[in-house]
Amino acid sequence: MIPRALAPAAALILAATSAGGHPHVFVDVALRFESDAQGRLTGVEVTWSYDDFFSLLILSDMGLDPDGDGQLTDAELARLKGFDLEEWPEGFEGDLYIHAGDEKIALDHPVPEAVRMEAGRIVATHRRGFGPVAPDGLRVEPYDPTYFVDYTLAGPVVLPDACAYAITEPDLDESQQAFRNMVAELSAEEQYDGVEVGNLFSDIMVISCRAPS
């Protein structure tokens, strides 16, 4: 899902590509988890590295980098900071989902922390507080329910020293078949209203931690 602030750039992408194709925006994700003295997780710093085409559209839409050299002034970076956190639609969960078993962990509204340009890509970082939550067994999934945006857990991922993680990438053939099966069960009206399928194509990260000695 795209926040309202990014709608103009999203509209340009749809105009330039097949409206029926998904996804349209590609984002690499890095995560740095914060913990308390007991080793429980208390927040996560999320870094989104946008693809170069979407980055170019954002800069153009905001009137930044007029000379096209990929270098932003301090004033331009200040304007860009938090651009992707403005005017989140009602119900938008920030395309990051953390579960402890069947329980979804509630995440605080994001706070922008930094933004930079890197090889023609916008790299934006924000923080979301939660918990505290015991980390062992947590399941972390970055995805857009509408699959307009494709998120890849490219890393790095930073966890407390006693913890590790494993990432399972989606089997795209199985995901496409699951998508077709889902659509086949929907009415034409339900299909027109949109189908939330992003979880079918998401990376899944599971955290495991050693017991305290």
Image (tube, rainbow, N blue to C red):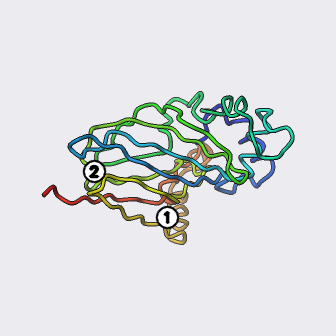
Residue receiving disc 1: 178
Q: Residues within 10 Å of mark 2 (few under 14, many from 20)?
A: many
Q: Quadrant of residue 59?
A: top right
Q: Is residue 89 left or right of residue 11?
A: left
Q: Nearer the viewer, residue 139 or 80?
A: 80
Percent x, y of residue 58: 73, 40
SS of the residue at dot 2? loop
Q: Residue furthest right?
A: 67
Q: Is residue 30 left or right of residue 63?
A: left
Residue receiving disc 2: 135
What residue lies at 77% left-to-right and 46% top-to-bottom? 70
Q: Residue furthest left?
A: 213
Q: Which label number is shown at residue 159?
A: none
Percent x, y of residue 213: 12, 58
Percent x, y of residue 132: 27, 38
User: Looking at the figure, which quarter contains the N terminus?
Assistant: top right
Give the Cα separation between the discs numbered 2 and 1.
30 Å
What residue lies at 41% left-to-right and 43% top-to-bottom? 44
Q: Residues within 10 Å of mark 1 (few under 14, many from 20)?
A: some
SS of the residue at dot 1? helix
Amino acid type of disc 1?
Ala
Percent x, y of residue 6: 67, 36
Q: Is residue 202 left or right of residue 132?
A: right
- Look at the numbered discs 2 and 1 and tell me whether their residues touch, using CB distance below 8 Å: no
Q: Is residue 157 left or right of residue 101?
A: right
Please report whichever mark, 2 or 1, sits nearer to the chain's N-terminal start: 2
Q: In front: mark 2 or mark 1?
A: 2
- Labels in figure, total: 2
Amino acid type of disc 2?
Pro
